[in-house]
Amino acid sequence: MPILSVVIATHNRSAYAVHAAKSVLSINSPLIELVMHDTSTDGKLQNEIMPLLVDARLHYRHCATRLSMTENHNLALAMASGDYVCVVGDDDTVAAEILDAVQWAIEHKVDAISPKVVANYAWPDFLSKTFGRGHSSRLYINDFSSGIAYADCGKGLRNSLQMACQGADGLPKIYHGIVRRAIMEQVKAKTGEYFHGVSPDVSGALGIAALTTSFAEIDYPLTIPGAAGNSNTGRSAMNSHRGNLEDDPHIKPYKNLVWPPLIPRFFSVETVWGQAAYETLSKLDAAQLERFNFLHLYAICLVSHPDYYKEIFNAAMVYRQQYGRNAAVTVVRVLMSAARIALAKAVRLARRAMRPSAAGGRFFIPDIPNIHAASDALKAFLSKKSTSFKGRSGNV
């Protein structure tokens, strides 16, 4: 039996997914398996994955039915058999030493590990509105301490709710994290599925946080997030990751979509995370929604997407009615919060302007053609530095 299942859900992205598969399978150990659930309609990945099926550690399933991202991830995770699971995107991969981290988790009876993002890769087709192709084909590697620290799930959940669940920072993660599979089975037993809403990564993090007491944060590269040109990250870099719910290709596959009136009704990173958090907590622990900072969500949406001000203030008025707040006071609080967020954003941009290159002073390895090569480059970099997870210098 494998101790780790790496899980990938994919749709019509064979140019990336096949390299992700090769990268994971290059880890020479029977203790790891790769699960891929594919809803592609172009038939490309089915053909390209065939030579890899000689490796019994690869479990590939094609589904002819068009599914939403969340449905695809739910079916993919259901195929896993490892003691621990790690979900990554089809343009991502895991580092070679991830099995050492899983062994450590088993020995120390740790339910979840959240590695910090130390290394990340931009595919050759990645474009940025500011820097064009300046990031493409680069593997960025940040400084890291190799340290391990235990974090409190309750505190992480409270902090996340105060920030309107904008991402999974400070929470145990299954997306680019490592989680005991039994925890995810508990989430499914309690709510009917592993993931809810329109963002599996945020939904998964909240589900784990609600059912565990602590997790380990590790400052060491255990996964490599990839950014492809047509990914959500790529769309964000081009400032095109937003739109009407009815028109967005990410949202269209969702059947009978539930969009809470408290969440501004348009597609963006912020609203997607908010909707996933709302749906997950509604099913898992509805009392936690009393802590959700809706005003912060409205403020950050107003700063990032002012052209959707009508949808934002419509949601704010629903909040006002549901929680018995004064309308004028609610509007003022949103505007004041938005002003603080805008000021902080201006300061960040000013500081970034002082480092005008695409890298901004970060170390990178150039001319990396795909995520498999990025994994090899990271392995060579760590070897050259004589750094390993087993030999880490950080303390628990």
Image (spheres, rainbow, N blue to C red):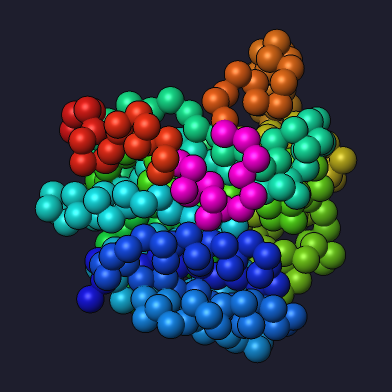
Residue at image position (68%, 14%) is 355
Looking at the picture, does residue 182 appear above or below residue 366? below
On whether residue 370 falls in the magenta region, the answer is: yes
Which residue, as the protein is rendered here, is positioned at the far top? 354
Residue at image position (72%, 66%) is 251
**Visible residue check, residue 130:** yes
Left or right, residue 312 beside residue 146: right
Q: Quadrant of the C terminus?
A: top left
Residue at image position (25%, 45%) is 214
Which residue, as the protein is rendered here, is positioned at the far left? 107
Q: Position of residue 103 (x, y in %)?
A: 19, 55
**Magenta range:** 365-378
Q: Position of residue 92 (x, y in %)?
A: 54, 55
Looking at the picture, does residue 188 appear above or below residue 265? below
Q: Position of residue 143 (x, y in %)?
A: 43, 25
Q: How many marks?
A: 0
Which residue, as the protein is rendered here, is positioned at the far bottom? 64
322 or 298: nearer the eye? 298
Residue at image position (32%, 39%) is 217
220 or 217: nearer the eye? 220
**Visible residue check, residue 160:** no
Q: Quadrant of the N terminus?
A: bottom left
372 or 125: nearer the eye? 372
383 or 305: nearer the eye? 383
On whether residue 221 falls in the magenta region, the answer is: no
Left or right, residue 126 beside residue 307: left
Left or right, residue 131 beside residue 175: right
